[in-house]
Image (cartoon, rainbow, N blue to C red):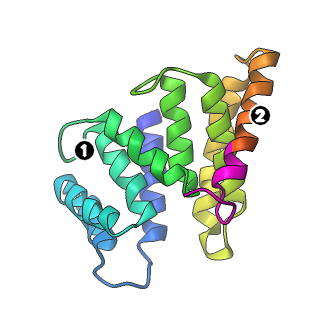
Amino acid sequence: MRAHFVASLFVLALVACASRPTSESAYNLGVSAYRAKDYSAARTHWSDAVASGDVSALNNLGYLFYYGLGGAADQQQAVGLWRRAAERGDSEAQWHLGAAYQEGKALPQSNVEAYAWYRFAIASAEAATENERPVEQEIANDARKSLAAIVERLTPEQFAAGQALAKQYIGAYARGGGGA
């Protein structure tokens, strides 16, 4: 069920991002391939888009690697791609990174880190521009659900550490607020 839900959100994000002004960009070719369930071609196109600096392609390529779509699963590479996108302000990548920490896949399991990345995803999504609003609202809602699922498992010390870490990430990596 969770995988289907994540996949549904991922497709929603693809629909929103596919309306980019550049026609036949590597990113858009990846979106078309993903919709056609040609995940191998989507990997190729999004790899090309990543090489051109497309942050959304980092997130999407990470998704394919994490779940082994279009080739072998490589969760280490997925997490690396998500981290690069998350540090550039991509809310969906921040949410995915939080989930990876929560699950403890390719990273040490840490509810404190998961909390921080979920809070950052919410803040990033809420700061979205008007044309990004519908997709970003979905990401914020999903990050809130993820946050609610772990917050009751945190000790007061872990909760405080998660809040401090979220504030640090937001200060360092929020769009327009520094970072890489």
Amino acid at the residue labelled 2 = Gln
Amino acid, disc 1: Leu
Q: Is residue 34 left or right of residue 125?
A: left
Mark 1 and 2 residues: CB-CB less than 8 Å, in contact?
no
Q: Position of residue 129 (x, y in %)?
A: 67, 72
- Label 1: element kind: loop
Which x, y percent locates residue 151? 72, 25
Q: Badge 1 is on which residue?
A: 69
Q: Is residue 50 magenta?
A: no
Q: Considering the image in quadrants, where does the C terminus appear?
A: bottom right
Image location (x, y in percent) of residue 61: 33, 52
Residue 80 placement: quadrant: top left
- Pointer 2: what residue? 163
Q: Residue at x 50, y 49 (%)?
A: 93
Q: Nearer the viewer, mark 1 or mark 2?
A: 2
Q: Residue at x 63, y 42 (%)?
A: 143
